[in-house]
Amino acid sequence: MAAAMALLPLLLFFLLCAAPAPSQAGDPFAYFDWEVTYLTAQPLGVPQKVIAINGQFPGPPLNVTTNWNVVVNVHNRLDEPLLLTWNGIQHRKNSWQDGVPGTNCPIPPSWNWTYRFQVKDQVGSFFYFPSAAALLHRAAGGYGGIVVNNRDVIPIPFPFPDGGDLTLLIGDWYARGHKDLRRSLDGGTPLGAPDGVLFNGLGPFRYNDSVVPPGITYERINVEPGRTYRLRVHNVGVSTSLNFRIQGHNLLLVETEGSYTSQQNYSNMDIHVGQSYSFLVTMDQNASTDYYVVASARFVDASTVDKLTGVAVLRYSNSQGPASGPLPDAPDDQYDTAFSINQARSIRWNVTASGARPNPQGSFHYGDITVTDVYLLQSRPPELIDGKLRSTINGISYITPSTPLILAQLFNVPGVYKLDFPNHPMNRLPKVDTSIINGTYKGFMEIIFQNNATTVQSYHLDGYAFFVVGMDYGLWTENSRGTYNKWDGVARSTIQVFPGAWTAVLVFLDNAGVWNLRVENLDSWYLGQEVYISVVNPEDSSDKTVLPLPDNTIFCGALSSLQKEQSHRFQYSGASSVGKIVSLVGFFMVWLAASWL
């Protein structure tokens, strides 16, 4: 035994040598192994192919904590190339992991590829989805929720929800497959009205026998009386704004897309395509019956509203019977966006709350920063360009090159893109082009989204949260800046723009890389309504501002010859160090036990 104790300091020395670097020790790794396949499901009572992950539709959650390193190994078992993007995750210095065609070659069928990124200085509610817009995969599923929790040392600015944390994925849904939808758009035919609205991949509860056919499986949310739950609600649909509400219960808004909000009670909330919200809901009603949970379409023809109403059931553990009677009322302005725009303006940043760091969210005084770049981005209804239906921003319909932009930039591949995207609408015929925005590193960009189309649009910017400072009807002018909120405009990554109206945001371009700015409405995105922002540090091209090319990069297009053969084996980053520690500890324990004997 004495010999064993004498060697203990030597063992500790070897353990320290084998241990990961301090930064790795402080930032844990979370590993996920996903197989993406087709699955036959019938959410609306009609059998169809959906995209599942590990046999689940929707896919499994990503539940991690601020500053964790996330490693997701994706096996593509589809018959088409695949990309996944992490809606709202900012990928600091790491647009290599963004998972959109401008930054990644798609994962070919029967290949696997490993995403590696850190949820650096972020908290909140996000979601992932298949992001190859040219394939319309999101219309078939493949999406799931992302929860980024606070570190224990940073308190949340509200009482901890003692009931738990629940994710609800709502969205419009087509009974036709995504390939059929793609053929429609390629043929110049709009997709038309969806066939229903899903809750977590399930169809509506049969609240009305004449509206909902029998035999449809619905979502049941089981709760305990008196407890408070945090509901993270994401609109993962194709194109439809949805109004979310729970019969007899208040929605206390506390967070949206990584920002804590001023806490306000709402009876319902309009959630537009691509947006995410967190509500605290207290189960303070009696349990004489279950309660309806509703997501109904907004700003659509009245004849389709019943069809486009998703219904789940909130069930108390002591419930006395099923939900019955009429659904809770939606806002009474189906053809008027006034209620919705005023509701959007009421959502404010909680400037006194800490986010991912201990300093208050409002410690970054965005209203005092001088704007260096202004982009007025105008959209119009889809139009014919060279005989094909296309959507545009400032008269340009984006065409995806075969070589991702960031690879073309790194390897100096000529002719892939142009840094000439106009900062205002041009008085010329629309065109198809690969024109991108040349952003100023650490510049402060003002972006005004002018919606001259006829439907609500949602815009999303990868790699950043922007400050929503203004929203109004009509055409934006220089005088519109006088209405801006320069103190507590909420910071988020997805914002709605109403038809015949504008929305203004401010964004600090401190995250070097190539970042996708897109409309989240899947049909318009497919038809070219997107652009990329290139943010390059002119003084330093090293990995101080952008992480180096990943060793598992997939090459395509003009760089296809650089592709190495896939190993199809999952290599855990950092696993060798952990393995050494486990092996040494195991060896020592066996040896120590033998010494005792």
Image (cartoon, rainbow, N blue to C red):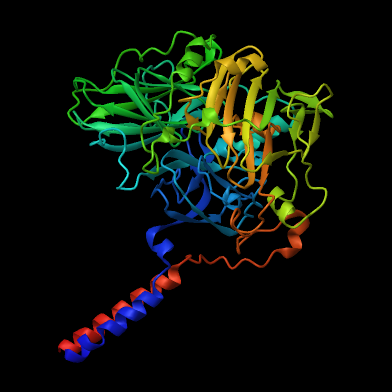
Query: Does residue 7 appear left or right of residue 461 in this picture?
Result: left
Q: Position of residue 343 (x, y in %)?
A: 45, 16
Residue for point 53% across, 12% down? 337
Residue closer to the observer: 49 or 582: 582
81 w.r.t. 274: above or below: below
Which quadrant holds residue 261? Answer: top left
Which quadrant holds residue 330? Answer: top left
Residue for point 49% across, 46% down? 52
Q: Position of residue 198 (x, y in %)?
A: 45, 30
Query: Does residue 56 appear left or right of residue 397 in this picture?
Result: left
68 w.r.t. 473: above or below: below
Which of the image's four quarters has the C terminus? bottom left
Q: Position of residue 235 (x, y in %)?
A: 48, 30
Residue for point 41% across, 45% down? 61
116 w.r.t. 150: above or below: below
Q: Position of residue 577 (x, y in %)?
A: 42, 72
